[in-house]
Image (cartoon, rainbow, N blue to C red):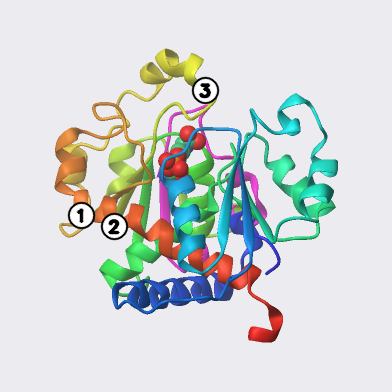
């Protein structure tokens, strides 16, 4: 593993390796065990979109591993004034030990990896959000003990989260049901890996999709960059809300995950979010541990292995 660009780049074994290390780092943090694994290393964090969790968890995670992180807003970088990604990649590779980037186009992240010579981590694009899904998988395994026999159900927009959750769930051996309106289906359903996978089912009826689910997941109806479509989307997604009526169709002990930020009253009700707050905020915490594992695997010195 040289980069973390999207979930489909990871093998099932690599996902489990990341989750195992994340569990270990979480345990060690809670028991006061300090690390210097990334001492002297610098992570550059390029943000072309807003962030609370990604920024704070990467920055804190880097400090906890003995390294440092630089917040690089695209408003201040020359990239925001049109300097090409291939030049930015080659320059930053000479200063930094890794780059985390949150941007719009997946191609930009792929190009950073292609032209740079340091590990690149995708901190969200319109297409994928692999760091979030690694934290989600970590949370599921923590609560359910294993992925065996579990069914995940995603209700809502076929966005970056849907794309990454589908691949992540299938790679760890879960069944995956997705319900979204016509015209809002996730891009990855066209991938051979998903198309030919008997464990994946696409629905347009949330009630059908959620039946017997062990994990119910949703995300905002209008993602960052789609703000002008918010009103149209509220109409398109009516009926795709996670509420108590829908949850009655899931398994009794089903958990609910949401990557946050949540729009209460749209994709999820206040009641369901609060009833499942322990799971949802554990999921948010696990961003820190999962990303520390990713950084260790990508950025530690080879001689330390
Ligand atoms: N879930 C997530 O990526 O949150 P932020 O947008 O706050 O980073
Ligand atoms: N789909 C959302 C996820 C936010 C973490 C977005 O892209 O805005």
Return the residue at label 1. 278
Q: CA distance from mark 2 to mark 3?
A: 28 Å
Screen quadrant of the C terminus? bottom right
Which one is nearer the viewer's eye here, 139 or 69?
69
Q: Quadrant of the N terminus?
A: bottom right
Q: Which mark is residue 28?
A: none
Magenta stretch in the rendered image:
171-194
- Assess whether residue 179 is covered by the magenta stretch: yes
Q: Residue at x 42, y 65 (%)?
A: 289
Kind of element beneath mark 1: helix
Rendering coords of residue 74 (x, y %): 65, 32
Rendering coords of residue 19 (x, y %): 45, 71
Asked if the residue at label 3 sits under 8 Å from ligand 2, the reply is yes
Q: Please state the horizontal and vertical placement of residue 241, each as a whole percent of the image.
A: 28, 32
The residue sitting at 65% across, 50% down in the picture is 191
225 is higher (above) or lower (below) than 91: above
Residue annotated with mark 2: 282
Tell me if 119 is positioned left or right of 51 in this view. right
Badge number at residue 226: 3
> Label 2's element?
helix
The answer, for residue 202, to whether it is visible in the render is: no
Query: Alpha carbon of mark 2 to alpha carbon of mark 1: how far?
Result: 6 Å
Camera-side residue of 214 and 109: 109
| Residue 129 or residue 191, whichever sits in front | 129
Task: Classify the position of ligand 1 by quadrant: top left, top right, bottom left or bottom right.
Answer: top left
Q: Are marks 1 and 3 in contact (CB under 8 Å)?
A: no
Of the two numbered discs 2 and 3 in the rendering, the one whose residue sits closer to the viewer: 2
User: In percent of the image, x 14 and y 46: which residue is there?
Assistant: 275
Q: Are marks 2 and 1 in contact (CB under 8 Å)?
A: yes
Is any part of residue 271 visible from this angle? yes
């Amino acid at each position: 593993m040289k980069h973390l660009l999207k979930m489909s780049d990871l093998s099932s074994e690599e996902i489990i390796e990341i989750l195992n290390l994340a569990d270990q780092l979480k345990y060690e943090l809670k028991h006061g065990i300090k690390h210097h694994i990334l001492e002297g290393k610098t992570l550059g964090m390029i943000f072309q979109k807003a962030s609370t969790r990604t920024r704070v968890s990467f920055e804190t995670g880097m400090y906890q591993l003995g390294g440092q992180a630089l917040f690089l807003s695209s408003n201040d970088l020359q990239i925001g004034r049109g300097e090409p990604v291939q030049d930015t990649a080659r320059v930053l590779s000479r200063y930094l030990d890794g780059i985390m980037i949150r941007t719009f186009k997946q191609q930009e992240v792929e190009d950073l990896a292609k032209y740079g010579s340091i590990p690149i981590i995708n901190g969200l694009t319109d297409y994928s959000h692999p760091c979030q899904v690694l934290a989600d998988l970590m949370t599921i395994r923590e609560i359910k003990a294993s992925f065996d026999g579990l069914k995940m159900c995603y209700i809502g927009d076929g966005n970056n989260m849907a794309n990454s959750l589908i691949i992540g769930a299938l790679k760890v051996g879960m069944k995956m049901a997705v319900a979204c309106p016509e015209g809002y289906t996730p891009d990855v359903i066209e991938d051979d890996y998903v198309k030919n996978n008997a464990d994946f089912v696409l629905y347009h009826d949330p009630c059908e999709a959620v039946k017997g689910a062990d994990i119910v997941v949703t995300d905002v109806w209008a993602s960052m960059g789609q703000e002008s479509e918010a009103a149209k989307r509220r109409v398109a997604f009516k009926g795709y809300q996670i509420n108590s009526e829908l949850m009655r169709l899931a398994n009794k002990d089903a958990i609910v995950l949401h990557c946050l930020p949540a729009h209460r009253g749209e994709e999820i009700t206040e009641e369901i979010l609060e009833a499942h707050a322990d799971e949802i905020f554990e999921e948010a915490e696990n961003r820190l541990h999962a990303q520390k594992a990713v950084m260790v695997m990508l950025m530690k010195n080879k001689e330390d292995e």
